[in-house]
Image (cartoon, coloured by chain):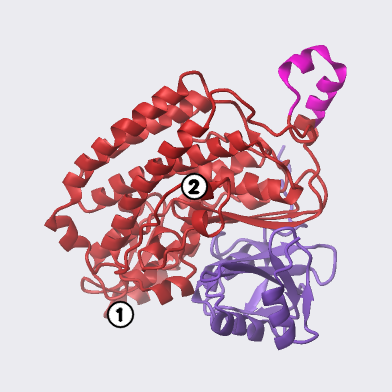
Chain colours: A red, B purple
Amino acid sequence: MATETPAELRSALSRDTMVINLGPQHPATHGVLRVRLELDGEKVLRAEPVIGYLHTGFEKTAETHTYQQATTLTDRMDYLAPMSNNLAYVLAVEKLMGLEVPKRAQYIRVLFAELTRLASHLVWLGTAVMDLGAMSLFFYCFREREIILDLVEATTGVRMNPSYFRVGGLAYDLPDGFHSRCQAFIDDFPRWMTSFRGLIENTLVEDRLRGVGMLNREQALALSVTGPMLRATGLAHDLRRAEPYCFYDEFDFQIPTRTEGDSYARMWVRIEEMYESLAIVRQVLPKITPRGPFMTADRKVALPPREEIYGNMEALIHQFKLVSQGFPVPKGEVYQAVEGPRGEMGFYLVSDGGPRPYRWRARTPSFYNLQSLPELCRGELVADVIVNIGTVDIVLGDVDK
Amino acid sequence: MITEGGILDALNARFPGSIEVVPAVDQASVRVDKDILRAVMEWLRLEQGYELLLDVCGVDWFPARPRFEVVYHVYNPTRPERLRVKVLVGQNEEVESMTAVWPGANWPEREAFDLMGITFRNHPDLTRIYMPEDWEGHPLRKDYPVAGPRVD
């Protein structure tokens, strides 16, 4: 976070070029992003993102939490795709512990990771198109997203920060009637996608986005850009395919790519990804039995069942110790990443053998992807900056953590 | 235990005696001396296809000496293969910035400087990124107080 003295601002104004601030309260910056723009008329000479307004210190906070408690912090980073963050984190801890998780739990994780990707891309679609000046799609996207959030709420009790994935499995089982509700959504959703596309498949949107915010493959790789932004430059890199986790290799899905590397390409990669996510949801739902194991059998991690706690002294003590002290994690380090809606969401954990992480590092995709904004905006117009912020698809909680 | 003989053998052949393999449960992991870090990284990127620098972060081993460890996660998207490279850095020492090799190292190195107080040599703009400029101390350090002074 940077601040200028009045003298610096005066000297900036006396130059031929003009320095202005976009944000941090501007609605088109999707939160509290501030971009310091150096302009020559309408032309952007330099765009410098200034971040930190939403810095929360999650990495420091996590060092005071047990491994299981720290799951709740991951929700709050990328709050549009909390389950992807949960997934990366719990997989990291499970890998470090060598923990076996029931296959049914992994399938449910896949289901919710993909539903979350759909919900996140819906918010992106609505807001990115709103940045272009089209208001109505925003309401339709949010209505559909609400149906996904209803499924999340029915399962976890909350809409936004579920912390549903836990080290060792899941917090709760699926509720009664979940399959039919989810199936109804799957059946209904393609119809809505068709109507969304009807609103954006036109020459207005295409002319507005083509050639805006160019980023080629070499630049993207050099700037550590991942996710749909990287795939829009022609590289079919997707961790679900490259390093399958949670049995992703059992599902049939495509990796949408485009080669242009502009805003239009990024838009279509994400829209096509929504169809692929829906295809995965459709495949995984029948594999999930209505009732079954959802937590590891390892009692070093899993809480004892309720019936035992009420009738068995050891189970009661065990539950108390697990909740108040947590479980120890073997000494060592681990990095685990998943393909989140915005790119590689990774966790690097260092354990000193105790019940709390020694170092809890989150590799958040928005932070790295936003770094490409100066490259995207150089030489373009002020209005294109808004478009570029929209098609980079940042979440400030993810940038600032 | 992942051995990934390929890249570890190649590293040992290219930089004999300077590569320490660190056992890890997840991916190939090495510790190198900070004086040859730049050479190792350039070689990894240009000749071994590790085109993507995924993450840079610091780990504070206070009160051990040298105090800090800078951890780089690099990725080869064509193979695909991961590698973790670590360097030890003392409290008053500097480590070479990787911005010349991967421009994407800019922000994460600023973050490590801001929150951990690790100085990167030849970084184009080594300023605080999250905390205000007049902030004192580096919050992710282990000796940084978790709670503020008590106010009665």
Q: Is residue A315 one of those drawn in magenta?
A: yes
Q: Is residue A50 one of those drawn in magenta?
A: no
Element at label 1:
loop
Circle 1 marks a residue in which chain? Answer: A
Q: What residue type is labelled 2?
A: Asp
| Residue A300 in which image quadrant | top right
Mark 2 crowdedness (10 Å alpha carbons): few <14, some 14-19, many ≥20: many
Which residue is depicted at the point 21% across and 46% down? A197
Which stretch is magenta?
A: A303-321
Q: Where is A45 relative to A202, above or below?
A: below
Decide if residue A334 is on the left or right side of residue B53.
right
Quarter containing the C terminus of chain B: top right
Circle 2 marks a residue in which chain? Answer: A
Residue that carries the numbered disc 2 in the rendered image: A78
**What x and y, as percent, mark residue B85?**
68, 72
Quarter containing the N terminus of chain B: bottom right
Q: What residue type is labelled 1?
A: Arg
Instruction: Out of A382 and A286, give the one closest to the viewer.
Output: A286
Residue that carries the numbered disc 1 in the rendered image: A15
Instruction: Out of A195 and A132, give the one closest to the viewer.
Output: A195
Q: Is most of the magenta stretch helix, strand or loop?
A: helix
Q: Where is B87 relative to A362, above or below?
A: below
State yes or no: discs 1 and 2 in contact (Cβ < 8 Å): no
| Residue B66 in which image quadrant | bottom right
